[in-house]
Image (tube, helix red, strand yellow):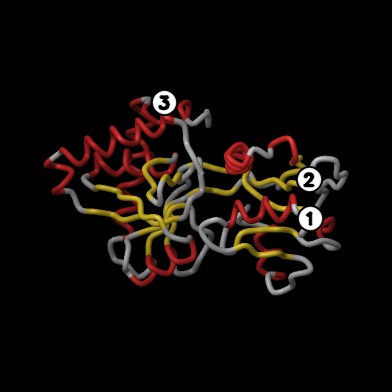
Amino acid sequence: MTINAGRLLAAALLASMLASSGLARAAPLIRLGSDDWCPFVCAVDGKPPGGYLVELAAMAMAPEGYRAEPVLMPLNRAITQTAHGDIEGVYAPPIDRRLRLSAPLAHSRACFYTRAGDDWTFQSIKSLKTLAVGVIDDYGYDDGPMDAYIAENRRKPSLIALAFGASAGTTNVQKLLGGRYRVMLEHTAVMAQLSKRLDVADRIRQAGCLEHELPLTIGFATQDIRAETWIRALADGMHKLEASGDLKALQKRYKFD
C-alpha cells in the first residue's frame, strides 16, 4: 500500500536522524515485525519506512534508550519469530498465548464491505450464518465475538474465506469484486487506503461495523525476560509523547485525531 509523500518524507527524516546519531547506533535494537497494513504499517518497495504504529513505536522507545526497527513479514510469521526469539516483537498482533501485549497504542474499528448495489447489512453475528466472509488469516478484528466466530469456523470455507500472505488485503478486495464471496471484513482505515490504491472506492460499500474496536498493541514473547522492561519503557515513552504534544501531532498527521 502507498502512503503520501509527506509521510514518506517524515519517515525518511526520522530514519536519517536515527542513522546519523551515535546514541541511536548504541541504543539496544528492538526489531518489530508485521506485514503491509497501511496506514498502521506501510511498505514501499518491500520495506516498511513508515506507518502510524511504526513511527509511534520508534518515537516512544527512543527517549527510553531503545531503537525500534520495523521488519516486513507476514503477521503470522512475525508472531512465530517473536515467540522463538528471532525478532523482539510484533506490531498489532491478535491475542496469542505466546505473546505478552503492551497497553493499546491506538484502536481500530473493522467493518463489513460488499459490492456497491448489494443490500446486505450486518446486524449481528447471526446475520453471518448464511454466507462466507472474507477475512485475513491470523488477523484480529475485535478481540471479542467476531474473532471468536472466526476461530470457531476457520475450517468451514462456507462461512470463513481465509486470505493469506503479504497481499491478503488486496486479494480479499479482488475476490469480493469478482464475486467469489459477497462480504469481506476489513479495518476502516486500511480499507480507505486499499480502495484508493486499487481505484475501486466507488465499487464498494460499507455494510455495517463491529461493535468493539480492536486495541492495537505491541506484542513481545511471553518467555522473554525483557518483555516487562520493554512494555514499561513503551508506556513511559507514550506518556512523554502525550505530555509533549507529539502524540497529538502524529495523530493529526495520520488523521486519527
Question: Which residue is situated farthest in the left direction here?
Answer: 22
At 70% from the left and 64% from the top, the residue drawn is 161
Q: Amino acid at mark 3?
A: Ala
Q: Amino acid at mark 2?
A: Arg
Q: Residue 60, how many percent across, how many down?
A: 33, 40
Q: Secondary structure at mark 3?
A: helix
Query: Across the whole image, how many numbered discs are drawn on residues?
Result: 3
Q: CA distance from mark 3 to mark 2?
A: 35 Å
Q: Amino acid at mark 1?
A: Gly
Circles 1 and 2, Cβ within 8 Å, touching? The answer is: yes
Q: Is residue 180 left or right of residue 171?
A: right
In the rendered image, which residue does mark 2 sit on? 115
Nearer-N-terminus badge (3/1): 1
Q: Which mark is residue 52?
A: none
In the rendered image, which residue does mark 3 sit on? 249
Q: CA distance from mark 1 to mark 2?
A: 9 Å
Q: Secondary structure at mark 1?
A: loop
At 85% from the left and 41% from the top, the residue drawn is 117
Q: Secondary structure at mark 2?
A: strand
Nearer-N-terminus badge (1/2): 2
**Label 3 vs label 2, nearer the camera:** 2
Q: CA distance from mark 3 to mark 1?
A: 41 Å
Q: Residue 164, how many percent across, how many down?
A: 57, 64
In the rendered image, which residue does mark 1 sit on? 179
Q: Residue 167, how many percent across, how many down?
A: 55, 56
Q: Residue 174, how many percent across, how many down?
A: 68, 52
